Amino acid sequence: MTKMLDTQEQLGHRPKFTGEFILEVDRVRKEFPGVVALDEVQLRVRPGTVHALMGENGAGKSTLMKIIAGVYTPDRGEVRFAGKPLNIQTPLDALNSGIAMIHQELNLMNTMTVAENIWIRREPRNGFGLINHNQMERQTQELFDRLNIRLKPQSMVGDLTVAEKQMVEIAKAVSYNSDVLIMDEPTSAITESEVEHLFAIIRDLKARGIGIVYITHKMSELFEIADELTVFRDGQYIGTVDAADVTRDEIIKMMVGREITDMFPKVDCPIGDVILEVQDLTLPGTFENISFTLRRGEILGVAGLVGSGRSNVAEAIFGVTPAASGTIWIDGEVVDVTSPGVAMDHGMAFLTEDRKETGCFLILDCLENIQMALLTRDKVKAGFVQQREVTALAEELAKTLRVKTPNLQERVENLSGGNQQKLLIARWLLTKPRILILDEPTRGIDVGAKSEIHRLITELAGQGVAVLMISSELPEVLGMSDRVMVMHEGRVSGVLDRSEANQVRIMDLASQ
């Protein structure tokens, strides 16, 4: 059973190991049906450093981390911890050995409180063997105070935003007495200010001698937080370099085997008439009096801090959680969007921010996931799906988005998170929407695919599609948007034209 320490002892823990490498991976191989996920890869992590693991979606990064964390067992090769061979069969073995992991896909239980999620299987107990909830909440608050996390231990996880859940995952991982902490895309669902908060936590952990393996697709983060980086490509080890000795372009070339010349291929598209107008949209306790217009061929970026209500507004417009009051016009006519079906009937498509919970059907195959939005649309005749046509379109989109899968019959749960995201984008593009709502469209997407998705968004705008794009990445918002709508605490705090928008003005409006 995992040993229980008080909060201060956990946070003050220093590994006793003083050798050169705290974690070593040597010639590890892992195969899945039809796929060689890892082919003789290596990785060496020094204590008290941040080692970034880079590569495109499907390169094998998450697979290796799951091997180290006890989720998968390697087919061959060796993992050494503190110089000794490591035999991990379960995630609990990894935790007991001093390895904790923050997974890319959140693994919290929505029906339990924040405190219960953090201390599950390690709950403090009273003299009668019963869980001492007061002590558990006190320990959680001490942990949050140390990490400067502003959440209540008593809050239900199901009521939190994706970004707030991410912070709970981070706190849970830190709460273990770990020598190695693996972070798989820890900033994919948090905004710029939360990223700085996370980096402060990481620097504190480094100072305590903890080795951190950091997986990210965000190039800007590498040069701020990483000491060394290792690159994988197509399941193979490419190389390891000091972060201070390499440029952004060199990293990208190592990752994709080619140069990416234009990350934000935004071009000026003809802006047409208003196709979507929202006036005084309100959902009490979530957002209030939201008003804006969206024109054909326009990309309207939506920025704001966690809790600003960006995703909630998108869900209301698409009918996932209809607003309590306010009006939505489409093509000048009032539309009562009571469900996603109504929204789709009027030419809307909505890419959700949480691919695992509300996006993908993980037990179905890729083709079934892509064609899901078409099952009641024009590709169904006399009750039968026009399978040949749909399959051809799906294969074309999967190729365009560079989805890495043996074939479209592969179950989606076997794909990397980034490739699952690409499938969701393909699903909605297949509906040929007139209004496309994108909530974090490149979350967990590698640099090469980001460029492809940005190009597709621009092409769609050029064809007259109106795009509402929510993003926590300010460079993406600034690089792709014709206008930027900024939200703060459930209200629109300002709308900026492309010519006047910059990071300072957006953050000023977002934090009023």
Image: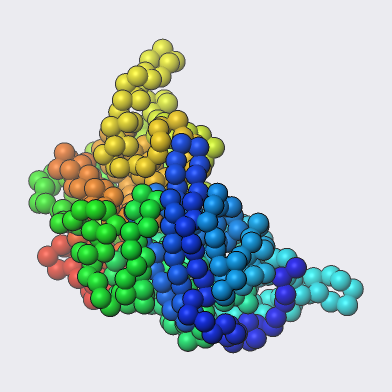
Residue 446 vs residue 104: left or right? left
Q: In which quarter of the image is residue 17?
A: bottom right
Q: Where is residue 28 in the image (x, y as percent from the top left)?
A: 49, 56
Question: Which colouring convention does the figure follow?
Answer: rainbow
The residue nearer to you, when weighing 89 against 148, is 89
The residue nearer to you, when weighing 111 against 484, is 111
Q: Where is residue 512 in the image (x, y as percent from the top left)?
A: 33, 77
Q: Position of residue 255 (x, y in %)?
A: 29, 57
| Rendered position, 508 above or below 440 | below
Q: Where is residue 329 in the image (x, y as percent from the top left)?
A: 29, 43
The answer to whether residue 490 is visible is no
Q: Which residue is drawn at 46% across and 77% down?
A: 46
| Rendered position, 449 above or below 35 | below
The N terminus is located in which quarter?
A: bottom right
Q: Residue at x 70, y 65 (%)?
A: 120
The answer to whether residue 93 is visible is yes
Q: Which residue in the rendered view is the most extreme toward the top? A: 382
